[in-house]
Amino acid sequence: MAALQLGVRGAHLGQRIGRGDRHLQVAVDDELRTVRARGWALADEELAPGIRSVAVPVRDGCGEVRAAMNVTVHAAETSRATLIDDYLPRLIRAASEISADWALWQARPHTELPAKDRADLTSSTAAGQIGGQVSV
């Protein structure tokens, strides 16, 4: 949500929160702006009692957010400091590696095959003929 353009984000928030609660919309928008600037999000028992979570974006080769990764812990077993100081750097590193792989995948040449040829490639017989790996 934090990666969306302001107008798109506002439309989504308006649908979820309701247009009548302007103070809540402003508070959520401020939090999303903070998350976007910081590059990660923390939910500390906001979604469910006893649950803490930290999340980071996974980006494509153009820098667009395409997915997210998170670590969720039980609040009684893992402190906020441990989540942020120990788990978050590892999560950021993992998301960065996946983002780099995504960019490499996007950078390789792609050829669109006709539907008939795609069906032939994905059949078990064709897959066996090319070593069991199909990349379309």
Image (cartoon, rainbow, N blue to C red):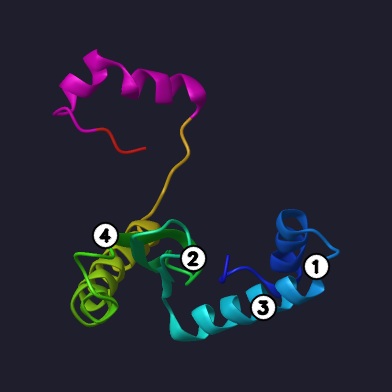
| C-alpha span from label 2 to label 3 | 23 Å
125 lies left or right of 106: left
* CB-based contact (under 8 Å), mark 3 and mark 4: no
| Picture coordinates of residue 7, whole percent (x, y) | 76, 70
Outermost residue on the left side: it is: 131
Residue identified by numbered label 2: 65
Label 4, on which residue?
74
- Residue at the right extreme? 20
Disc marking residue 100: none
With respect to residue 121, does 125 lie above or below? Answer: above
Residue 119 is inside the magenta segment: yes
Q: Which residue is mark 3?
A: 27
Q: Position of residue 81 (x, y in %)?
A: 25, 82
Of the pair 16 and 128, the residue shown nearer to us: 16
Q: For this view, does 4 lie left or right of residue 56?
A: right
Specify which label sits upstream in the sequence, 2 or 4: 2
